[in-house]
Image (cartoon, helix red, strand yellow):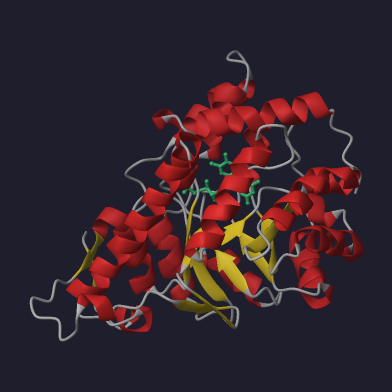
């Protein structure tokens, strides 16, 4: 599908997104449900801290951590340095990295140069591609395959962002045929297909319908962190319908914790991934204990990355240390052990 959006408008929007996602006002703080999740402290774990193992197997591959830098930005002048920094840090720490939407490459194959240069500079990093559902519906698998090739992607993420598109003045709101498009892609693409929300989470009904598509993972990306209703509301001109409506929908969505519980309840064949408001290794541990396989951080790593390489590596180190601390203090040697522990949900 050829997007006809002018370059200037595209780049300005991507810059707005970075700036606005870093503002507290655009975070649905307190809504993730993570404060309700309690893990039990075990006073005498029968293991040494040095034995704790945070490696994880996902989509049949073993990784050093269950962590993912969630899909963020790409395709504009400021993004290359940021993405290079994130890719180097991910390769160094053994995290996976979801890239931002590759939509621009569909119309302009030269836009793939950003990814080719990053791939060349950081050959060992595990990258996951990204495309919106509205674009996928109009795009042949062969074109998506080119996006995979440019990145040498391990998987392709298709993002769902209904609320964002509705609140965006230039939004793309044709979602009809989305399930069929996912099924077609999952059957024909050379790499696994993953579906993710972008901060509004999933109901049980949608998660059940996704079972039939053949996707290999669903990242619930629930309510509780970066909120695209708020961000697009802040971008819209203040006397517009969208700006007013966005205030009404400032806390719209299914929380991250409820979304993960919804996914566990329907016993999916796909892996459950979790993101949306994850701000510490303890938050991540709670989601792993609830049944997530992989946990994604977007805003928290972006904030550190804009402060520089040192800040980014430090934050990643802290998140890993916090996860190890949970393993030790719950008497879990590894993530599989943690997933067997009792989790309480406060009312
Ligand atoms: C600046 C920015 C750009 C984003 N762009 C994308 C994108 O292109 N594709 C996508 O799937 N998600 C995108 N997201 C959504 C995140 O991957 C994530 O689902 C959401 O921000 C919730 O996670 P958080 O609370 O940790 O930020 C973006 C997030 C941020 C902060």
**Which of the image's four quarters has the C terminus?**
bottom left
Q: In this view, does 315 lie to the left or right of 298?
A: left
Residue 278 can be seen, yes or no: no
Res 281 → quadrant: bottom left
Which residue sits at x=72%, y=65%?
153
Give the image location of residue 121, x and y in percent: 69, 54
Q: Residue furthest front?
A: 121
Q: What is the number of callouts on the image?
A: 0
Give the image location of residue 174, x and y in percent: 78, 46
Q: Is residue 64 left or right of residue 112?
A: left
Q: Which residue lies furthest to the bottom in this view?
A: 46
Q: Is residue 292 left or right of residue 168?
A: left
- Tell me: residue 68, above or below residue 32: below
Give the image location of residue 35, x and y in percent: 26, 54
Which residue sits at x=64%, y=70%?
210
- Tell me: residue 315, above or below residue 285: above
Which residue sits at x=80%, y=77%?
187
- Tell me: residue 55, above or below residue 135: below
Which residue sits at x=19%, y=84%?
47
Q: In this view, does 334 lie to the left or right of 108?
A: left
């Amino acid at each position: 599908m050829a997007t006809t959006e002018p370059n200037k408008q595209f780049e300005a929007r991507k810059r707005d997104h970075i700036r606005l996602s870093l503002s507290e006002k655009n975070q649905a703080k307190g809504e993730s449900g993570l404060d309700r999740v309690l893990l039990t402290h075990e006073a005498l774990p029968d293991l040494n801290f040095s034995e704790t193992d945070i490696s994880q197997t996902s989509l049949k591959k073993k990784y050093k951590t269950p962590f993912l830098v969630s899909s963020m930005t790409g395709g504009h002048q400021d993004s290359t340095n940021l993405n290079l920094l994130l890719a180097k840090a991910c390769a160094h720490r053994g995290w996976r990295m979801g890239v931002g939407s590759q939509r621009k490459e569909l119309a302009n194959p030269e836009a793939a140069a950003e990814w080719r240069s990053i791939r060349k500079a950081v050959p060992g990093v595990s990258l996951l591609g990204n495309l919106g559902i509205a674009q996928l519906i109009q795009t042949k698998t062969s074109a998506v395959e080119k996006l995979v090739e440019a990145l040498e992607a391990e998987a392709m993420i298709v993002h769902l962002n209904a609320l964002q598109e509705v609140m965006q003045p230039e939004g793309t709101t044709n979602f009809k045929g989305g399930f069929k498009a996912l099924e077609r892609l999952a059957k024909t693409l050379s790499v696994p297909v993953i579906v993710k929300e972008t901060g509004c989470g999933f109901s049980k009904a949608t998660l059940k319908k996704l079972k039939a598509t053949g996707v290999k993972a669903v990242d619930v990306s629930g309510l509780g962190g970066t909120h695209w209703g708020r961000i697009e509301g802040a971008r819209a001109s203040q006397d517009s319908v969208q700006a007013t409506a966005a205030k009404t929908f400032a806390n719209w969505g299914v929380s991250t914790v409820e979304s993960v519980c919804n996914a566990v309840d329907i016993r999916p064949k796909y892996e459950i991934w979790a993101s949306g408001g994850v701000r510490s290794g303890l938050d991540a541990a709670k989601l792993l204990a609830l049944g997530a396989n992989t946990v994604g951080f977007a805003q928290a790593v972006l904030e550190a990355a804009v402060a520089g390489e040192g800040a980014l590596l430090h934050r990643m180190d802290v998140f890993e240390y916090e996860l190890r601390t949970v393993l030790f203090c719950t008497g879990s040697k590894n993530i599989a052990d943690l997933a067997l522990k009792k989790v309480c949900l406060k009312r």
